[in-house]
Amino acid sequence: MGDLLRNSIFFSDQHLCYADILSPSEVRARIEVAILCFLRNLNSSTPSVSDLSLISRKMSNSIVSRGLLTDSTRIFLSHSFCTKSLMNERTAASFIRVWKVMEMCYQILVQEKKVTQRELFYKLLCDSPQFFTSQSQVNRSIQDLVALLRCSRYSLSIMAASRGAVAGRLLLQEPNQDVVDCSACGSSGYAISGDLDLLEKLVMKSDARYIIVVEKHAIFQRLAEDGLFNLIPCILITAKGYPDIGTRFLLHRMSREFPELPILALVDWNPAGLAILCTFKFGSITMGLEAYRYACNIKWLGLRKDDIEQLTPEESLVPLKPRDYQIAESLGSSDILQDDYKEELAIMIQSGYRAEIEALFFHGYDFLAKYIGKKIVQNNYI
């Protein structure tokens, strides 16, 4: 099966691997090819259970692609494979999970439905409790299926969970719906849908001059409540923590719709904050086959080392946790970080401390808007 997949329509680039966006009928056809290959080997003169050859989603198989005419950088995966075998005790369970998820996706495609990963988990938990006991097992199996069939997760009719929000100088119109003014949606903002097809069809208009990505929902609410977008013509967007697909897709869509607008990130000064920024900027290894579809050229507004030295009281600094060091090691071992990002990360680790955006409230609750405005006027972002 691995040989067939390597020489089939599933592979279309000599160096970089990526997942295609396919119609339901095309995805069903790829699933049917996989099943037929499995049955062919099982019914051959020397019967065998085919192994699953999947594109490896390890850092060692990643390629950092940098634009020749722009400073944009994307993560892709190369043609290194890992194998899941029913005959291998270590991979047997995950081998079965891939086929179970494939079966479920085929049924969903036939029914012309869409489901979230959470809905899929509970369906599999009820149907195959001996193989699915956690959401993470389903998530990994979905990515394994993406790596096998070389089609996007959304092409499998799996929607992203809705979590992010957007506010500010942005008018949105869904098909056959009224126009939504995101500056009038209150401090909670406009909820971003997990339906990528809907997000792609949104009609957008804006007179903003900047897009500001905010790591935390509480900070997003504070800035929306203070009407930052009236002081600085901007669009505010948050994923409420680690970026979900819907928020990343909408940000990427806005970067295409308004290519002249700088995209600036406001994150905590810690390795996790930098990791969140990098996910928006480069994509993620876990979703390496389709990461480039959600990446955009984002700049680091803050918090940065100068802010910590000049604006943050010493009492607000918190010692780094073991998890921070693990994230820092992962970031430092990759090829994606530019030199000034590496310098910031090195100073974080050397100091042994982290700082949250909220530390700036030491200067007053209205200080954050002033801080952002001053940074923008000075072009103080990297």
Image (cartoon, grey):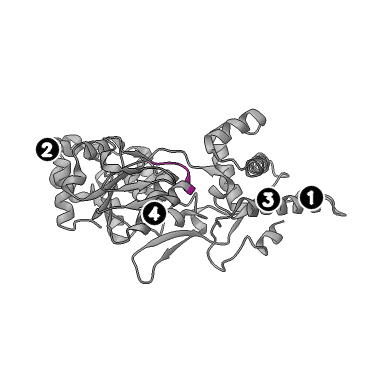
Residue visible at 35% across and 71% down in the picture? 69
Residue 304 position, x and y percent, is 23, 49
Residue beneath disc 3: 31
Where does label 4 land, which residue? 252
- Tag nearer the camera, 1 or 3: 3
Q: Residue at x 46, y 42 (%)?
A: 194
State the CA–CA distance, disc 3 to disc 2.
58 Å
The quadrant in which the C terminus is found is bottom left
| Element type where label 1 sits in the image | helix
Residue indicated by mark 2: 363
In this orientation, does residue 153 appear? no
Give the number of the mark in front: 2 or 4. Answer: 4
Find out whether residue 71 is within the magenta segment: no
Q: Residue furthest right?
A: 45
Mark carried by residue 359:
none
Judging from the image, what secondary structure is the residue with disc 2 in? helix
Residue at 55% x, 55% y is: 21
